[in-house]
Structures are given as C-alpha cells and as structure tokens.
Amino acid sequence: IEQRAISRADLLIYASHWAASSAINNFAASPEKVAVLSFGANFPVVLPRDEVLNHRRGPQCRLLFVGVEWVRKGGVIAFDTLVKLRELGIDAHLTICGCTPPADLTHEKLTVFPFLDKNDAAQLDQLVRLYQEADFFLLPSRAECAGVVFCEASSFGVPSFTTDTGGIADYVE
C-alpha cells in the first residue's frame, strides 16, 4: 500500500531526512518529489521568549523524560543516568511522563506521571510546569522517526540529551 501511494503521489512530505531517505531508498521515490518539513511543537501553550530564555534554574539537576514507550524511548538508560548522577554526588531528580517504568525500577528521586492529557486544562498545566521546571530533557531513544517532543522541550528552552538515531538529528541540532 505504501509503495503504491508513493508511486502515485505528486509530492511526498516527510518529517525527517531519515524518513525521506527511506522513501527514496526503500520505495524508489523520485528524489525530485520528496520534501522534508520538520514538525513544530505540538503544544497549545506558547511562552514569551524572554520568559523562556531568562528562567533561572535551581541547584538541583532536574531531568525530564516524556515518552509513551518505555523500552523504545530508552527508559532504562534515563533511569541509569539518574542513578549514576546521584552516585557522582549530583543532586539529580528524574521525572517520567507518559509511561510507567518496570516495578523494580524505583528511586526516591524519581517521580512518575503515567499519562497527562493535553486536552485537559489541569493536566496541561501540570505538563507545562514539568517542562518549566526541567533543567534537561532526557530521551535516549533507540528508534525514532521524528521527534516532536524535542520541539516541545525546545519551546520551553530546555536542552535535550538524546541519541542520534532515525530522524532525531532533524529536531536536535
């Protein structure tokens, strides 16, 4: 079905160079009809630029992980990062939003929000606070076509730590 759609299309728009290359290399899409348009933040809240850039961070290293698929998003690596930072004497805290780690991965400096719905005002406010309070966005994905969540972190001025896999490089430069 995908091959037929690609063959019949006049223009193919992909969210990352990785995905566009896949269309060309795996489905023989004509490079002339392939374009890449990166996504922006899928967030109804836009903070003023000065507020984002002038936000003062505290002494604690607050890490934020937002992802639905624990394994594919590298959840264990994020958890291990928290543990290692604590071992090094860094006052680190990890907040996970969107999924629940395995029951055996617990830590006093770990907070979990299994799911926050952006369509619910109170839950959206909570998610905004998580981004506003974060020092770093940590999502060591093992596979990723495109990374809208990195756009969201950037919209709050939060630098991302991730892996160079799939289409992430189009979202984290």
Image (spheres, rainbow, N blue to C red):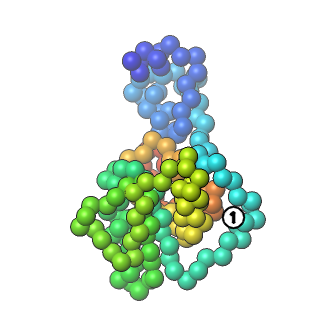
Above or below, 23 relative to 150: above
Q: Secondary structure at mark 1?
A: helix
Residues 38 and 34: in front is 38
Specify the quadrant that holds the C terminus. bottom right
Above or below, 45 relative to 4: below
Residues 45 and 64: in front is 45
Specify the quadrant that holds the N terminus. top left
The residue under the point 54% across, 68% down is 134
Q: Amino acid at mark 1?
A: Val
The residue under the point 66% across, 52% down is 45
Q: Which residue is mark 1?
A: 52
Q: Could you tell me if residue 73 is visible in this image?
A: no
Q: Position of residue 16 (x, y in %)?
A: 52, 39
Q: Could you tell me if residue 29 is visible in this image?
A: yes
The residue under the point 55% across, 61% down is 126
Q: Which residue ends up furthest to the bottom in the rendered image?
A: 89
Q: Is residue 154 left or right of residue 67?
A: right
Q: Position of residue 10 (x, y in %)?
A: 58, 16
Q: Position of residue 129 (x, y in %)?
A: 58, 64
| Image quadrant assignment for residue 33 | top right
